[in-house]
Image (cartoon, rainbow, N blue to C red):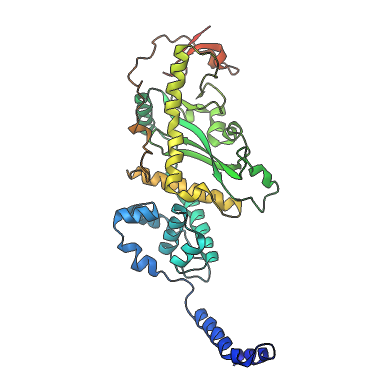
């Protein structure tokens, strides 16, 4: 009756012939309110009938890993109030959105929900994965450290435990930040700085996505937990004789090997640079694997910034889960370092091991004429 009254009150401004049409619209709205807001025919009738390979193409993870994720998340995930959306649908919608560039509106229609509800569920799932599954991103210990060192040794750079590198994750201009321009990087777009420590296979050992894109890589590195521990108690992270490697964006130190500068270099220095950069390329390949699997990371439209950080962290967690399960890269040509052994891996390293000038806090590459990375003490001083 209330709807009927509204229609007749509108008759002064609307022609009488339109009143039945208005009533039909109002009745349709009332019927839609009586239907549960979220249904998942796509999940029940389509997604679970995919072959494993087709499923992985769309959801970027195998059915087994999705099932494993659900087991880990089920006690921590709470459906958003009023939507009655179970974890299964929320997780699959999140994976579909992160792995594809389909517009949010199309994804929402595919999963029979609204754009706003889809966004809320994606944020919720990413938060839970980021907070509850970070044990999937762990620093190597003992046997794992030895396995990683052997892989780097085969790649021509022994005594290495991890590569540090950074990439930009494009985001929209932050709305709630006091200084949004801090996120505007030197490449002239808004981004988060994702700094990661990786192994030769492309797995993330530690990540930091807390800082804006305008920050230099070296500055972000100094803010990481790894750098702070290395300053105080490096033995907690690095077994005796081991070190990290990184490109020229990072400061040379006793625990971090970097390339010689682009000056006139000796043959051994050039060989050192080639080996270091070839081994350090593992981090770049890890970022390539990550962004090819979760293509939304090439342009992440999420607000506020903390939701973007949670999404990046969640993608890194799921990336590690996929590699741990031995899944192949999503795109051809992006193979882990273990499948691209450096061509100089079999060359013999010098046996002379005088003390290295870099054992002093102020040391730089200019203190050495030779620095071959068998370990942090392989240098011949001037």
In this picture, is 157 found above or below 229?
Answer: above
The answer to whether residue 99 is left or right of residue 367 is left
State the residue lying farthest toward the left: 51
- From the viewer's side, name the closer residue of 361 and 373: 373
Residue visible at 38% across and 46% down in the picture? 321
Quadrant in which the N terminus appears: bottom right
Total label count? 0
Give how far across and how far down residue 97 sits, in percent: 46, 57
Give how far across and how far down residue 123 sits, in percent: 53, 57
The answer to whether residue 134 is left or right of residue 367 is left
In this picture, is 100 found above or below 155?
Answer: below
Q: Is residue 378 visible?
A: no
Q: Is residue 179 visible?
A: yes
Give how far across and how far down residue 180 sits, in percent: 67, 47
State the residue lying farthest toward the top: 382
The answer to whether residue 160 is left or right of residue 365 is left
The answer to whether residue 154 is left or right of residue 196 is left
Give how far across and how far down residue 256 sits, in percent: 51, 25
In this picture, is 365 found above or below 249?
Answer: above
Residue visible at 55% across and 65% down in the picture? 116
Residue visible at 33% across and 33% down in the picture? 339
Residue visible at 54% across and 19% down in the picture? 262
């Amino acid at each position: 009756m209330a709807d009927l009254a509204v229609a007749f009150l509108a008759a002064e401004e609307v022609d009488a012939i339109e009143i039945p049409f208005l009533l039909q619209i109002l009745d349709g709205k009332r019927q839609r309110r009586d239907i549960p807001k979220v249904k998942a025919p796509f999940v029940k009738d389509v997604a679970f009938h995919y072959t494993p390979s087709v499923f992985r193409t769309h959801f970027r993870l195998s059915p087994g890993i999705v099932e494993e994720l659900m087991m880990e998340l089920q006690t921590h995930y709470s459906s958003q109030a009023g939507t009655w959306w179970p974890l299964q649908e929320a997780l699959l919608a999140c994976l579909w959105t992160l792995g594809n560039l389909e517009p949010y509106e199309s994804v929402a229609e595919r999963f029979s929900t609204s754009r706003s509800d889809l966004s809320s569920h994606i944020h919720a799932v990413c938060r839970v994965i980021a907070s509850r599954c970070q044990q999937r991103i762990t620093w190597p210990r003992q046997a794992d450290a030895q396995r990683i060192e052997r892989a780097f040794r085969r790649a021509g750079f022994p005594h290495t435990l991890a590569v540090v590198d950074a990439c930009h994750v494009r985001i929209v201009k932050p709305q709630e930040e006091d200084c949004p321009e801090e996120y505007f990087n030197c490449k002239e777009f808004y981004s988060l700085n994702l700094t990661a420590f990786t192994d030769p296979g492309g797995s993330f050992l530690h990540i930091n996505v807390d800082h804006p894109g305008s920050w230099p890589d070296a500055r972000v590195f100094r803010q990481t937990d790894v750098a702070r521990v290395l300053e105080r108690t490096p033995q907690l992270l690095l077994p005796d004789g081991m070190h990290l490697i990184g490109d020229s964006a990072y400061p040379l130190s006793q625990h971090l090997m970097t390339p010689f500068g682009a000056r006139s270099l000796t043959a051994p220095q050039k060989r050192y640079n080639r080996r270091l950069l070839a081994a350090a390329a593992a981090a770049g390949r890890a970022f390539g694997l990550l962004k090819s699997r979760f293509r939304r990371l090439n342009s992440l439209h999420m607000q506020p910034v903390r939701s973007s950080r949670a999404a990046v962290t969640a993608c890194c967690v799921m990336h590690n889960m996929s590699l741990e399960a031995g899944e192949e890269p999503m795109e051809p040509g992006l193979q882990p370092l273990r499948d691209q052994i450096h061509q100089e891996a079999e060359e013999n390293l010098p046996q002379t091991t005088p003390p290295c000038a870099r054992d002093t806090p102020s040391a730089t590459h200019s203190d050495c004429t030779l620095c071959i990375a068998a370990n942090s003490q392989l240098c011949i001083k001037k």
